[in-house]
Amino acid sequence: MLKKDIIKSFKLLKYYEFINYNLIYNNSAINRYKKDNFELSANKIKELENLKKSIMNLNNCELKKNAKNIVFSDGNPKSKIMLIGEAPGANEDLEGLPFVGRAGMLLDKMLGAINLDRKKVYISNIVNYRPPENRRPTDEEIKKYLPFITKHIEIIQPKILILLGSTAMNALIGSDIVISKMRGKWIEKKFGNCKTSVIITFHPAFLMRQPAQKKMAWIDLKMIRDKKTNLKI
Ligand code: URA
């Protein structure tokens, strides 16, 4: 090797050292099309904020007029498991969070039984404001909020969607079906651009009134646990 080649190699080595060559060298292919986690999360958060704003801008809504707070959601927006209840109650209205009252305590126990908790899932309701006297939301009210909960599902993109009780079931699956026949089955369903596996189970408030039905809810929970394992969630 000539002296000038040795000097050249030496300079090259120094240069590699200077640019931290070992740190940036990587044999794997660059995937230019994969959005990174950060970008995905930032988009999701923005979309959720916009959705919340559009619900807060609703006009002529009796529910909103009588409520103290919007109850939008709780849990992890990146979760692959989403739960949808009926409507906020008094405690939820006060705190602005879904399922924080007595029914929520039972829901937490149900989730705990299959090794889940509210931080690992995402929770919302069919309507986002408390109906006066905790009455069931009317068909008209449900119709008004349906585009919002559908959009909510599209943003979250759950792989498993758990509908709690007949109000959520009738609003999202069909009005001419009964929960006793529909619970405990997987239904493949599309909400906008979100294809998901839906399961219907009893609402925790119903289970508090009818504890004998808890054994059926346990069957549903075990189905959710198995699905979660199969989908590697
Ligand atoms: N019941 C529901 O359906 N949702 C809540 O957030 C609380 C009670």
Image (cartoon, grey):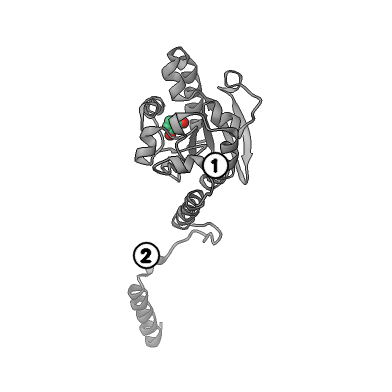
- Ligand 1 quadrant assignment: top left
Q: Secondary structure at mark 2?
A: helix
On the question of residue 128 being in view, the answer is no
In the rendered image, residue 158, in percent from the top left (x then y), is placed at: 52, 40
Residue at the far top: name it. 212
Circle 2 sits on which residue? 23
Rounded to the nearest angstrom, the CA distance separating label 1 from label 2 is: 46 Å
Residue 149, placed above or below residue 134: below
**Residue 125 disc label:** none
Q: Secondary structure at mark 1?
A: helix
Which of 229 and 203 lies nearest the eye of the viewer?
Answer: 203
Q: Could you tell which of marks 1 and 2 lies nearer the N-terminus?
A: 2
Query: Which corner quadrant of the image does residue 94 belong to?
Result: top left
Which of 181 and 29 lies nearest the eye of the viewer?
Answer: 181
Residue type at mark 1: give it.
Ile
Circle 1 sits on which residue? 149
Where does the N terminus fall, quadrant-wise?
bottom left
Q: Badge 1: how crowded within 10 Å, few (<14), some, or many (20+)?
A: many
On the question of residue 197 being in view, the answer is yes
Distance from mark 1 CB to nearest ligand 1 atom below 8 Å: no
Residue type at mark 2: give it.
Leu
In the rendered image, residue 216, in percent from the top left (x then y), is placed at: 50, 16
Residue 57, placed above or below residue 210: below
Question: Going 36% across and 26% down the picture, which residue do you hit?
Answer: 102
In the rendered image, residue 189, in percent from the top left (x then y), is placed at: 63, 36
Residue 197, placed above or below residue 44: above
In the rendered image, residue 72, in percent from the top left (x then y), is placed at: 44, 43
Q: Are marks 1 and 2 in contact (CB under 8 Å)?
A: no
Distance from mark 2 CB to nearest ligand 1 atom below 8 Å: no
Report the mark closest to the observer, 1 or 2. 1
Q: How many discs appear?
A: 2
Q: Badge 2: how crowded within 10 Å, few (<14), some, or many (20+)?
A: few
